[in-house]
Amino acid sequence: MSAAEEVKSEKPKSLNKPIRKRVKKFGKMMTRKIAKIQSRSSLVPDTPFIDKSHFPFLEEFEDKWEVIRDEVKEVLKHRDDIPGFEQISPDQHRIAKAQQWKTFILFGFGKQLEKNCKQAPVTAELLSRVPNVQTAWFSILAPGYHIPAHTGVTKGIVRSHLGLILPEAREKCRIRVDQEIRAWEHGKAFAFDDTYEHEVWNDTPDERVILLFDFDRPMGWAGRALNATLLYLMKFTAFYQEPKKNLASFEDRFEAATRRADENLEKLSE
């Protein structure tokens, strides 16, 4: 039985508790206020899409995209053991359902997942050189899936996407950020501010795979201080604690699955 089959993606009962709803509502209110200060402190444009010239390190990802693609192809050989996003983070149950959006996570909340990173060493090494990388994962979107409109948590983070494995009808697989829509391109990266409303469509019969990673927005001292404080406080919430626990479990399961596969191959070659 795969890891994905072992863990049922159900909406946790705790999400319905009034106290958790109040905490989330207060958190959203505070992040909106903080976002205004971060916007004024930003050293890059506060626009939905941000020109990648502001982030020179993205060039190396584009230069080595084929190596990154080859690494994710190896990971995808164990597709059934890659969790759905909602299994890692139950708070994402509205936008990720039925394991249609799978995530193979390499960095979580600024920490490297060593076992997963061993599966994609070149990708992990490139990510380790991104200034203040926060999260990074191979984002695997099922054919025909739509990620509903949603917004990110903090303007202190910039998100980047790198196209790796794309549908043949590429123009039918696209992302909207605010009012602008883009389709991914093989080996091309772009950056955007996920606090603007965004959504994704894969209106094709093919799977879409990208490298997604978040890093600190370049800001003046006031914005940096607020962002560091916000990220620190988030570590005491269920938003952080639940994924942290789930990540460790799925990382171990994926490693065990690949080890079993290697052992089976060795037996066949004897």
Image (cartoon, grey):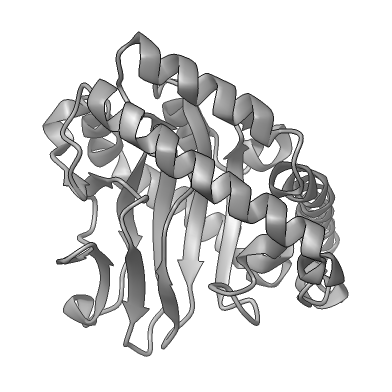
- Which residue is drawn at the image coordinates 87% and 73% (left, top)? 6
Could you tell me which quadrant the C terminus lies in?
bottom right
x%, y% of residue 31? Answer: 48, 41
Asked if residue 67 can be seen in this view, the reply is yes
Closer-to-camera residue (260/68): 68
- Answer above or below: position of 17 versus 50: below
Question: Left of 211 or right of it: where is 260?
Answer: right
The N terminus is located in which quarter? bottom right
Counting the numbered discs, the total is 0
Please name the residue shown 36% across and 9% down the image.
221
Give the image location of residue 102, x and y in percent: 58, 66
Asked whether residue 89 is in view, the answer is no
**Residue at the spot 55% in from the left edge and 41% down from the top edge:** 120
Q: Position of residue 204 (x, y in %)?
A: 32, 87
Nearer the observer, 71 or 85: 85
Name the residue nearer the viewer: 50 or 230: 230
Left or right, 156 with respect to 263, comes to left
Q: Is residue 44 left or right of residue 226?
A: left
Task: Identify whether 251 is placed above or below 2.
Answer: above
